[in-house]
Amino acid sequence: MDVSLHVIRYFCVLADELHFGRAAERLSITPPSLSQQISRLEQQLDVKLFDRSPRKVELTAYGRELLPLARRVLDDHNQLLAWGRSVNREQRAPLLRVGVIAAGAGTLTTAAISATLQLVPNARIEMRRLGFFEVAEELESGRVDVVFAPSPMRLPPRVRVEPLWQEPRVLVVPADHALAGRESISIQEASDEVFVAASGGPREIVDWWVVDPRPDGRRPKRGPTADSVEGLLELVAAGAGVNIAGASASSHYRREELAYVRVDDIDPVTISLCSLVDSRNPMVPTFRETASSLSPLAD
């Protein structure tokens, strides 16, 4: 037995209206045609669904039993169509996968994404948190299209680097540390501290972050390492050492156990937008232009 969906719809509308004329009008067919379709359904099911008389139309006991089942079929069909439309929209919508290292470009990250969505309202944005030294690998694998990453970096020529944001660096210390209440310090004041740093990266980049060597030629004491900003902050909170980070970490990674103190006499960190020079994603140039237009470092 094969009951067509449109006949199920005819049955439900007639059950709602209990009037062939009104139901036919809603369905944009003639009353005789509706009557024929309902009669055919009754023949297929071998039950009487409606009691008909010149004065009224009523559901039979079988009709009342069938109605919730028929409505469920229509609801399921409508959900299936809605799902199909949703998938179709997603397939047509442009996709941009944005990688972020640590706090990214501070508030500029959010502003660039928001402005891009205003320009391309149907765009899909997927965010991905990256490790400190994963920029080239993630871009070349296609897992991300653009990355907000702090300089210095060691990247292949295929990766385009556009400086967008610059901020001072801060010393991250436990909240009960002797320097925690200071607004700013000199790097020399941290000479006796043990520094925790990122693991697995090029030596010259790690040295830049911990300021090794110091202006007076001394070398900082090295402590434990971690492969993520969360891991580094956990080490600092546990008292394993102190860390140097970009100033935006103080708002993106605020914790009661930590304090952030500006270091006045070391170079600021520059956050850049990285992307492949030969990227085929049409959203990449749009995002680059949008982010650049919001950058305080733009010419």
Image (cartoon, rainbow, N blue to C red):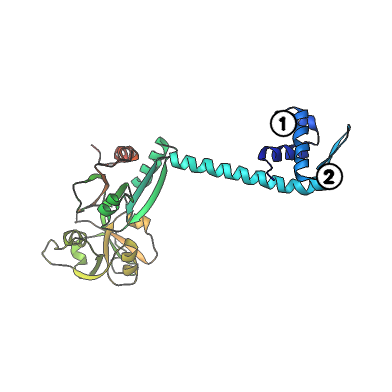
Query: Where on the picture, by quarter, is residue 71?
Result: top right
Residue 52 percent across, percent down from the top left: 86, 36
Whether 38 is drawn above or below 214: the answer is: above
Of 163 and 3, nearer the camera is 3
- Name the front one of labels 1 and 2: 2
- In the rendered image, the residue lying farthest to the left is 217
Label located before the other in sequence (1 or 2)? 1
Q: Position of residue 254 (x, y in %)?
A: 38, 60
Nearer to me, 194 or 59: 59
Is 262 displayed left or right of 71 in the figure? left
| Residue that badge 2 annotates | 60
Amino acid under disc 1? Arg
Residue 26's disc is: 1
The residue at 53%/42% (across/down) is 84
Q: Secondary structure at mark 1?
A: helix
Q: How many marks?
A: 2
Horizontal arrangement in the rendering, residue 34 relative to residue 245 (left or right): right
Q: CA distance from mark 1 to mark 2?
A: 22 Å
Which residue is pictured at 77% across the width and 30% down the height?
22
Residue at x 29% of width, y 69% of height: 178
Residue 209 seen anywhere in this rendered image of the structure: yes
Q: Is residue 188 above or below residue 86?
A: below
Q: Callout 2: 10 Å neighbours few (<14), some, many (20+)?
A: some
- Name the one closer to the observer, 163 or 240: 163
Secondary structure found at label 2? loop
**Position of the C terminus by quadrant:** top left
Q: What residue appears at the point 56 percent right and 42 percent down from the top-left corner?
A: 82
